[in-house]
Image (cartoon, rainbow, N blue to C red):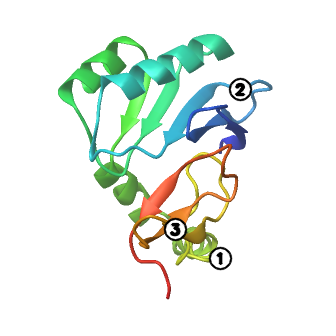
Amino acid sequence: GYKASVERTGSQAGVDIHLVAPGAKNVTLLAHCKAWDAYRVGLKAARELRAAMTAAGLGEGLLLTSGRFTPEAVAYARQNNIHLMDGAEFLTGIAGLAPEKSLALLKFATQGDFLTPTCPSCSLKMISRKSTKEGRKYWGCRNYPRCKHMVAGAVPA
């Protein structure tokens, strides 16, 4: 049903998805998507979405996480017309899709290079770097020094 367009959120790591309901001409719902460092998403994320909704002149928003929401975020969302979708609810929705839609989503989701991390700020594939002091390997953003995002972990030899 909904038509979606993705907008960068500026300096924050993430995107806003502007959703237009069937039959509507203008954006009706704002979905805030961001790489959270925590399994439990709290009040700060809900407040950021509310601010983005206000700036866009929208009265309805959606906050989605692969994890869970804190009780404070749930209470704030109820008071501010923000729909919350946690990881379990998201997976239930995917499981309920018709087989052809599920297959199309799987094909889309598994395209590309999944061994190389993507920078959460720039949406570019990161590159393997080596620390000059310690000699340890890490993933660094291609936009360095403008973007200083790094990911420690398994870097190919």
Which residue, given by chain and number where applicable, does mark 2 sit on?
Answer: 27
Which residue, given by chain and number where applicable, does mark 1 sit on?
Answer: 112
Judging from the image, what secondary structure is the residue with disc 2 in? loop
Foreground of the two, 122 or 111: 122
Residue at position x 41%, y 77% in the image:
154
Residue at position x 49%, y 56% in the image:
150
Kind of residue at disc 2: Val
Q: First in sequence, mark 1 or 3: give its number.
A: 3
Residue 41 as seen in the image, left or right of residue 135: left
Q: Compared with residue 64, is residue 82 higher up or lower down, i.e. above or below?
A: above
Asked if one can make out residue 45 in the rendered structure from this viewpoint, the answer is: yes
For disc 1, the neighbor class at 10 Å (few under 14, some 14 to 19, many from 20) is few
Q: Quadrant of residue 104?
A: bottom right
- CB atoms of marks 1 and 3 within 8 Å: no
Quadrant of the image for the N terminus?
top right
Q: First in sequence, mark 2 or 3: give its number.
A: 2
Judging from the image, what secondary structure is the residue with disc 1 in? loop
Q: Compared with residue 2, is residue 100 higher up or lower down, i.e. above or below?
A: below
Q: First in sequence, mark 2 or 1: give its number.
A: 2
Q: Compared with residue 27, is residue 139 higher up or lower down, i.e. above or below?
A: below
Q: Closer to us: mark 2 or mark 3?
A: 2
Residue at position x 36%, y 52% in the image:
66
For disc 3, the neighbor class at 10 Å (few under 14, some 14 to 19, many from 20) is few
- Residue 32: mark: none
Kind of residue at disc 1: Gly
Asked if one can make out residue 59 in the rendered structure from this viewpoint, the answer is: no
Q: Position of residue 114 (x, y in %)?
A: 54, 75
Please tell me how many numbered marks the rendered image carries.
3
Which residue, given by chain and number where applicable, does mark 3 sit on?
Answer: 98
